[in-house]
Image: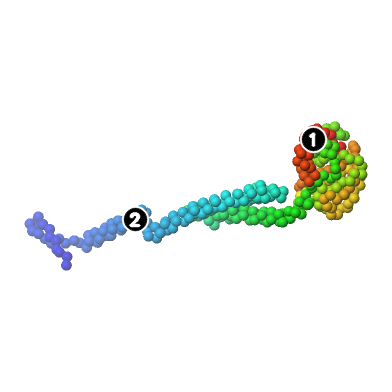
Amino acid sequence: MARKKFIYNPQTLDYEEYKVSFGKRLRNFCLFIVAAGVIGFFTVTIVENKIGSPKERMQAREIEFLQFQYEILNKKIGKIDNLVDEMQDRDENIYRMIFEADPISYSVREAGYGGTDRYMTLDGYDNSSIVKATAKRIDILESQLNIQAKSFDEVYEMATNKAEMLKCIPAIMPVRNVDINRISSHFGHRTDPFYKIKKFHSGIDFSAPIGTKIYCTGNGVVEKVVTSNSGYGNYIIVNHGYGYKTRYAHLKKSLVKKGQKVSRGENIALMGNTGKSTAPHLHYEVIKNDKPINPVDFFYNDLTPEEYEQILKLSEKPSMTMD
């Protein structure tokens, strides 16, 4: 039971019982409730902002853990990146070079997956940038590894066919027992005998009597047999595969037909003086991927190191072509 309260009344000079009206009590109660609510609200807000709820604290720990794991994952991806770079370097500068295979272009090796739309589902989160960057790096690595795997398959196939490839690549001179000092004109810019100006000479000219035997320099298939009174005159093109072709021009006579298989050392024609030619000779070309290259580099089965050095020195001297 609540204790009674008394107050002194100066008018009556006596103590009287203190009575609070219902309205005042209701007002005091409402004020108390409002004050308690305000204090409670600010208390909860401060606690949640500064400390966080148990669920939020658990989520914060999980986010921190995941960020840490992403850092570890990115470091591992960086190591894999380095390994892929090393594999690509070996592939380009060792394996594909050994077999004279065309390099894989940078744009193909560095191609990723899709565009920006591929990663749109990862947007809208606090750590979206980390997740998107990691996903993109993994996609690019996957693409690079797929390309590298295909490249190794090609290299493996080339390795298994190495013996056949060596038989096909031009490796001898097309004219037997020729004195290298009698090679009348070399590969490169030479003086044209008709126009008296320097023009690019795409092969080597071997001078010898009409009817001298001409030999195929590597295994292959006859791609063209042309009869003409101009330009290269009568000539043969042999396709050796692996990007290699050889041309034998200004012939007196062809001894093979289009589509015929030929072998290294096989007599395929006789030397002549047909077409744009100043004297009996053979114009011989080695073509790699549709571009003429210096035939001297493919005489290694016929030349000693000393002869090779000598022929390189001779090729540096100015000369006039025979066609």
> What residue sits 80% from the left and 32% below the top?
318
* Percent coordinates x, y for residue 67 in the rendering: 47, 54
- The residue nearer to you, when weighing 318 against 305, is 305
Q: Residues within 10 Å of mark 2 (few under 14, many from 20)?
A: few
Q: How is the image coloured?
A: rainbow
Task: Evaluate whether residue 228 shows in this view.
Answer: no
Q: Which residue is mark 1?
A: 314
* Percent coordinates x, y for residue 299 in the rendering: 79, 44
Q: Which residue is mark 2?
A: 47
Which quarter of the image is occupied by the N terminus? bottom left
Task: Evaluate whether residue 285 shows in this view.
Answer: yes
> What residue sits 62% from the left and 53% below the top?
144
> What residue sits 76% from the left and 52% below the top?
165
Residue 46's place in the image compared with 270, above or below, is below
What element does badge 1 sit on?
A: helix
Q: Residues within 10 Å of mark 1 (few under 14, many from 20)?
A: some
> What residue sits 84% from the left and 54% below the top?
261
- The residue nearer to you, when weighing 304 against 65, is 304
* Percent coordinates x, y for residue 62 in the rendering: 44, 58
- Taking the view exactly as shown, the residue that stands out farthest to the left is 13
Type of the residue with mark 2? Val
- Taking the view exactly as shown, the residue that stands out farthest to the bottom is 1
Residue 191's place in the image compared with 106, above or below, is above
Looking at the image, tell me whether mark 2 or mark 1 is earlier in sequence order. Answer: 2
Type of the residue with mark 1? Leu
- The residue nearer to you, when weighing 241 against 171, is 171
Residue 158's quadrant in the figure? Answer: bottom right
Residue 53's quadrant in the figure? Answer: bottom left
Give the number of the mark in front: 2 or 1.
Answer: 1
What element does badge 2 sit on?
A: helix
